[in-house]
Amino acid sequence: MGRRREDGAGHRPNGTPSPQPRRRPTIQDLARAAATSPSTASRALSGNGYVAADVRARVLEAAERIGYVPDINARTLRNRRSRAVGVLISDLRNPFYANLAAVIEQQLRSAGYHVIVVNNDGEQHAEVEGARTFLAVRVSAAIITPVSDRAVHMLMDDGVPVVQADRMVDGLTTDGVLVDNVQGARRITDHLIGLGHTRIALLIDETGWTTGAGRLAGYRAALRDAGLPMDPGLVVPTRFQPDTAREAVTALLDRRPDVTALFAANNRLAEGAFQALQEGGHRMPDDISLVAFDDVPWMSMVSPGITTVDQHTDDLGRACAQLVVDRIAGGAAGHMTVRYIEPSIVLRGSTAPPRTSPATSVRPDPGPAAAAPSA
Amino acid sequence: MGRRREDGAGHRPNGTPSPQPRRRPTIQDLARAAATSPSTASRALSGNGYVAADVRARVLEAAERIGYVPDINARTLRNRRSRAVGVLISDLRNPFYANLAAVIEQQLRSAGYHVIVVNNDGEQHAEVEGARTFLAVRVSAAIITPVSDRAVHMLMDDGVPVVQADRMVDGLTTDGVLVDNVQGARRITDHLIGLGHTRIALLIDETGWTTGAGRLAGYRAALRDAGLPMDPGLVVPTRFQPDTAREAVTALLDRRPDVTALFAANNRLAEGAFQALQEGGHRMPDDISLVAFDDVPWMSMVSPGITTVDQHTDDLGRACAQLVVDRIAGGAAGHMTVRYIEPSIVLRGSTAPPRTSPATSVRPDPGPAAAAPSA
DNA sequence: CATCCGTATGGAATCGTTCCCATATGCGTA
DNA sequence: TACGCATATGGGAACGATTCCATACGGATG
């Protein structure tokens, strides 16, 4: 493997300008080296059409020998579709998205695609810009955590299959992979209710996307089914930034000391909530229980560990990649498919029965006993 | 903004096959729509060469009206160089790399480049494969956290400027951005020594790259300068995985209960070390002090917070992007430049003087005394 | 008046690949 | 013998943008 180029001039340091950067071998060169024509060489490499076995071998050998790498741009120009998939993701700094991107990249790479990553940072402008890039390079498909419908429409209008990941925008009829937010939120709220909590606050940054809306709905459903009152003062709106969330939680606990449990709707908000509780001297789970949607690494590092909804990001990413690959293979045929990932609950030390248990009103602080995290 | 296409057939659901995916407008179409020639249209868009002001305006208006998006592949084919930069990164799941990728993407996007991301997962094979992809799409440059020299050589041989990020491989004469690992490790070791620690263990997974080698060297230099003995038994080798690190730390503390401080050479190892200490009932910083190289979010979430070396990943990423942009602009001219990022120490709760303070100048081997956890 | 230069435009070649098509050979069958 | 068919090969026309070049005009300069 890895024979050097015939004409290779050895390694040149970056700083040493080479008079002419040595023209890369083209399929013409390859054909010459294999004593055949470009057409035949192309067929030999791609496997499309007839090629005699010995000629094929000669071409492959020559390709290896002269270090031929097909020019993807020329190929894409001719085919009018590339082997690239655009991935438009909210924020690589958020471990949830980073993980998603990593899984998608890995899966698609092994399926023979490469990935073009664009951060949209939750901004429409960046999203549209990203879509434009995807069109310009003629991606085969795109995976998007959508901000608005504009970008998706641009791509769909050009016949580019789109998979919406993690959330879906209203009115868009694309494939998608979603987490069952309602179910996840309902079950973790149930967990709190089961422990005896009745005043459970929800910290949430948006309800316009399917993520926030679903989590809110699940929270409400659990309360309703348990016959608990829906106290609007317990749904705490905040911005996405942990700092804002922290302030919101501090203000909440100031205003409503009767709250015994807090549900943070995503990992960033949980970060702020956790800090607010620590700074405010509220002990978990003795003074207050904390749960979060979206399990990320720090939640199992802190003590107590945070009880969370695990979204199974790996499954999510794999499903996106799979859907994309299927859609590329199957063309536009077949109906829009939305796959749901069933989240699961991870119990850790941050949840326990409320201090004043509804059973016996004279139950004193269970103290350290309740603090012991799971093995 | 955002006028729809003239011929736009409205939005089609993914699942509805369109007879023919509506040919995208080319520069020919644009020229026709602006009543001029492709040559002039091209000049009008790129700003190269002469175009009368009114013609230029007509072209721009037409482009907007018909929704013209230039085909990057055709452009690249013709120019033999694309506006893409390849980013070959170790592991997007590691917050350090994810952050690095995010910053690089952001910077390059605003400089008019787009980014092709490939994970190499620390494997040579994936790295070479990634380099091949970069060549195939004719990236303008590549940013690599290198595993071996193979990929870098492939790119350099084709005249693609390479920036090595975070670490550099021996014998490669490319641009690079490095963290001053020696200085960082030395200073954080100094911090421990200043607190009175004399038996400081170093948990490290590799010393073959500049990262590990530098951190080891810094650690050693600090000990030497303080006149402390270099105890080889205190340099603990481990694999990269947190689990392995955890086991290594548990074994170490079993074997050497006299250790009063632990230095984890990166964020993954710190994860394992932190878990090992918690599971082993070693309280930080009372029983043992813990420091780490590479500050990542969980380290400020846990209690006590971990005292770390902050690598300033944002600066690192920005410097990489800058170097790439400069190198593309300046061609191969100019010498190879390596920029160093000066790390800083972040003091948190995980470090304190050792239990048996050195103030008591009687220096008996505290031995088992230090090992007995009281809690 | 002849030249030259700056401005402006369109024609046409080019980048590297793929694939349609024409062509050719050998073989089985009508 | 004539024909169809499977196998095999190479010529050449795309794909879409860029840029070199030829051309042209008006005004300034010798």
Image: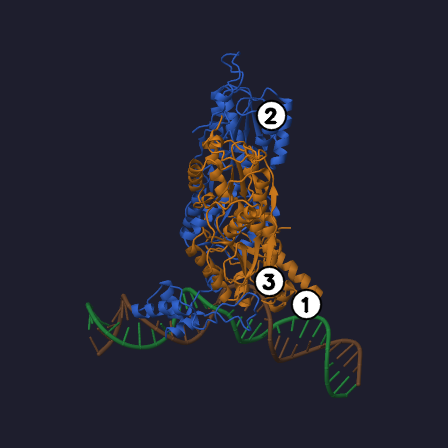
Chain colours: A blue, B orange, C green, D brown
Instruction: Give the position of the C terminus of chain A as an image quadrant.
Output: top left
Spatial CA span between label 1 and label 3: 30 Å
Pinpoint residue A103: horizontal percent, then vertical percent: 45, 46
Determine whether A73 is above or below B235 in the image: below
- The answer to whether residue C25 is left or right of residue A288 is left
Q: Nearer the viewer, mark 3 or mark 2?
A: 2
Is the residue marked by circle 3 packed among few (<14), some (14-19), or many (20+) residues within 10 Å?
many
Pinpoint residue B319: horizontal percent, then vertical percent: 61, 54
Query: Are both tags, 3 and 2, on one chain?
Result: no
Q: Earlier in the sequence, mark 1 or mark 3?
A: 1
Query: Are both tags, 2 and 1, on one chain?
Result: no
Spatial CA span between label 3 and label 2: 52 Å
Residue at image location 53% in from the left, 42% down from the top: B292
Q: In the structure shown, which secondary structural element does the residue marked by tag 2 occupy?
A: loop
Determine whether A301 is above or below A111 in the image: above
Residue on which disc 1 sits: B51
Q: Quick check: can you spot residue B111?
A: yes
Residue type, numbered disc 2? Gly
Subunit bearing disc 2: A
Q: Quick check: can you spot residue A332?
A: no
Residue B238 figure quarter: top left
Residue on which disc 2 sits: A281
Residue type, numbered disc 1? Val
Q: In the structure shown, which secondary structural element does the residue marked by tag 1 occupy?
A: loop
Residue at image location 55% in from the left, 67% down from the top: B79
Is the residue marked by circle 2 packed among few (<14), some (14-19), or many (20+) residues within 10 Å?
few
Residue on which disc 3 sits: B327
